[in-house]
Amino acid sequence: MLRWLIPLLLISLLEFYSFQAVKTVVKSKWVLGIYLLVSVGVIVYITYFFLTHDRGSGQNKQSLFAIGLFLITFVPKIFLTLILLGEDIYRLFSGCLNYFIGNNRGDYFFPQRRRFVSQIALGLAAVPFGSLLYGMTIGKYNFKVRKQTLFFPDLPPEFDGTTITQISDIHSGSFDNPEKIQYAIDLINEQNSDLVLFTGDIVNTHAKEMHPWIDTFKRIHNPKLGKFSVLGNHDYGEYFDWSSNEEKLANFNEIKDLHQQIDFDLLLNRNVEIKKGQDSIRLIGVENWGKHFKKAGDLELASKGVKKEDFKILMSHDPSHWDAEVQHDDNHYHLTLSGHTHGFQFGIEIPGWIKWSPVQYVYKQWAGLYENVGRYVYVNRGFGFHAYPGRVGIMPEITVIELKKGENVA
């Protein structure tokens, strides 16, 4: 009973103060009535959804909508409540002071609520409301091509100028706009890279989520050096209550087969030699290894046959793997490509000024390029979206990395 009482009290508090703010500014009974009707309708819908939704069924479009509706409704109301609660503390203090010094005017202990405070509160609440709405309608498909040039003194000469396009975290079960996805595939193809790499999470949970999108992703061009992929934590079906281990395994096998259907060579703890002229590099792919998630990756097994002097590119979905193991490994993995964090799908990025997201308090490497004694990891911000059906400040990313022979001049 207590677990329901606390949320009920919090929602009641948010609704009370939000209505106070609207009532102070808006005098039309029709508008107030519509506001109350919409608020009650949203609460009833969200409550019904969370009471009836099977949490073991995995992420789907209905749960994405419910989460988005919850956030876009209650995050702005938190702003309203904090401001008006602060005003009430001031009103209480002012009322007490006036009472004790005999300065009370009229029949009210509390001073009247000030209209301009409610106006400010509503104005501030409009910022997260507008941002979340933008993220759910435009931001989630606002694909950005981010380019990075990396210099390596031991890069084989034939690979000087080689380009790599990286995508990560497709989460196909969240998509709802075929035209936007086709636009993103066109962006990938426009880069005309020598190598295309996908660093995991092709679905949210079920292989069938990708079925409507197979033909679309199969249109990614086949570059000279190939298309390769690895698995992410969501590809193992860990976040679903399966009726049997056999059902879970069958879904996992179907997910692995999806990579072949879109013409990607799935690297499951193995490596391949990529040749260009007389030179070659090693591309290594590990299964998911995460500090907070499934540890199926085996770096030693994946690197079997790889020599220390080989130039190495490692694909590992979760950047915590690089932080915990890869950057300190004696094998000297030159470049690691990861994803997983999505940049939390929320943050602030102004190049040269600020790069912030709440996810940075969980992951040291969460978006973009990081380096340690000549070893690099690049964390892709993700292609798709999950949980919150949008992106605010941290946009979906297509990464293009150019490899150059030489010393880093930065």
Image: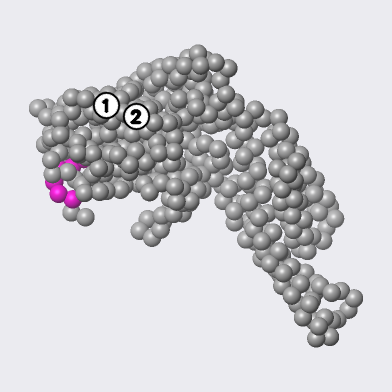
Would residue 129 be found to the left or right of residue 258 on screen?
Answer: right
| Circle 1/circle 2 CB separation < 8 Å | yes
The amino acid type found where label 2 is placed reads Gly
At 15% across and 38% down in the image, what residue appears?
Answer: 155
* Image coordinates for residue 216, horizontal then vertical, percent: 44, 24
Tell me: residue 390, above or below residue 303. below
Q: Quadrant of residue 66?
A: top right
| Quarter that holds the N terminus | top right
Q: In which quarter of the image is residue 196?
A: top left
Could you say whether the residue bearing mark 2 is in a helix, strand or loop? Answer: loop
Would residue 354 be found to the left or right of residue 389 on screen?
Answer: left
Badge 1 crowding class, 10 Å Cα cut-off, few under 14, some 14 to 19, many 20 or more, is many
Tell me: residue 351, above or below residue 207. below
Tell me: residue 289, above or below residue 123. above
Q: Name the residue under label 1.
A: 302
- Label annotation for residue 393: none
Badge 2 crowding class, 10 Å Cα cut-off, few under 14, some 14 to 19, many 20 or more, is many
At 13% across and 40% down in the image, what residue appears?
Answer: 154
- Label annotation for residue 297: 2
The amino acid type found where label 1 is placed reads Ala
The magenta segment is: 401-408
Foreground residue among 6 and 159: 6
At 57% across and 51% down in the image, what residue appears?
Answer: 131
* Image coordinates for residue 400, horizontal then vertical, percent: 31, 39
The answer for how far apart the CA atoms under marks 1 and 2 are is: 8 Å
Foreground residue among 262 and 259: 259
At 23% across and 39% down in the image, what residue appears?
Answer: 329
187 magenta-colored: no
| Quarter that holds the C terminus | bottom left
